[in-house]
Image (spheres, grey):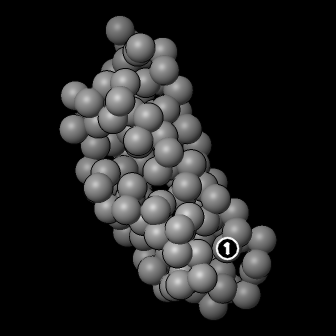
Amino acid sequence: MRGDARACLHDIVQAADDIAEFTAVSFDAYVADKRARLSVERQFTVIGEALKALSRLEPALLARLPTVSSMIAFRNILIHRYQAIDQSIVYQHARSSLPKLREAAAALLAELDRG
């Protein structure tokens, strides 16, 4: 199971890095870039799915990550209420809560890699 948990954490870190790359611009530039918006939304769904998988595989690891509930809920909004997506909220999540999750996931991944 640890290998699967490692894969989930890797996916979270990679998706967060991709989101950071696409949101390293002003809000107006982000909103004007359809590819960036679609990519960021997709990567948030990857993070939500990885967190859900991690909850089944290693609940103790999941408990050590911040903002899990809000990230899973955010993924649900992106998937099921796509017509109501507010890009200012997407951008805010990318710039505020996501870096904390990314940092914690990277630390857990490094811990697992050390054995």
Report if residue 24 is visible in the image.
Answer: no
Query: In the image, residue 25 lies at what x, y percent?
Result: 62, 77
> Of helix, strand and loop, which one carries label 1?
helix
Front-most of residues 107 and 40: 40
Please, is residue 46 above or below residue 26 in the view?
above
Q: Residues within 10 Å of mark 1 (few under 14, many from 20)?
A: some
Quarter residue 87 falls in: bottom right
Please, is residue 27 above or below residue 21 in the view?
below
Front-most of residues 79 and 13: 79
Front-most of residues 44 and 78: 78
Task: State the residue lying farthest toward the front.
Answer: 80
Tally the marks.
1
Q: The N terminus appears in which quarter of the rendering?
A: top left
Which residue is the site of mark 1? Answer: 37
Which residue is rendered at x = 56% and y = 48% of the image?
46
Relative placement, left or right, of 89 versus 44 is left
Q: The C terminus appears in which quarter of the rendering?
A: top left
Query: In the image, residue 32 lies at what x, y percent?
Result: 73, 87
Which residue is rendered at x = 41% and y = 15% of the image?
2
Which residue is rendered at x = 63% and y = 91% of the image?
28
Quarter residue 30 falls in: bottom right
Which residue is rendered at x = 42% and y = 65% of the image?
74
Amino acid type, callout 1? Arg
Relative placement, left or right, of 10 versus 40 is left
Query: In the image, residue 7 lies at what x, y percent?
Result: 53, 26
Report if residue 5 is visible in the image.
Answer: yes
Front-most of residues 39 and 104: 39
Task: State the residue lying farthest toward the bottom.
Answer: 28
Relative placement, left or right, of 89 versus 100 is right
Query: In the image, residue 113 lies at what x, y percent?
Result: 43, 16
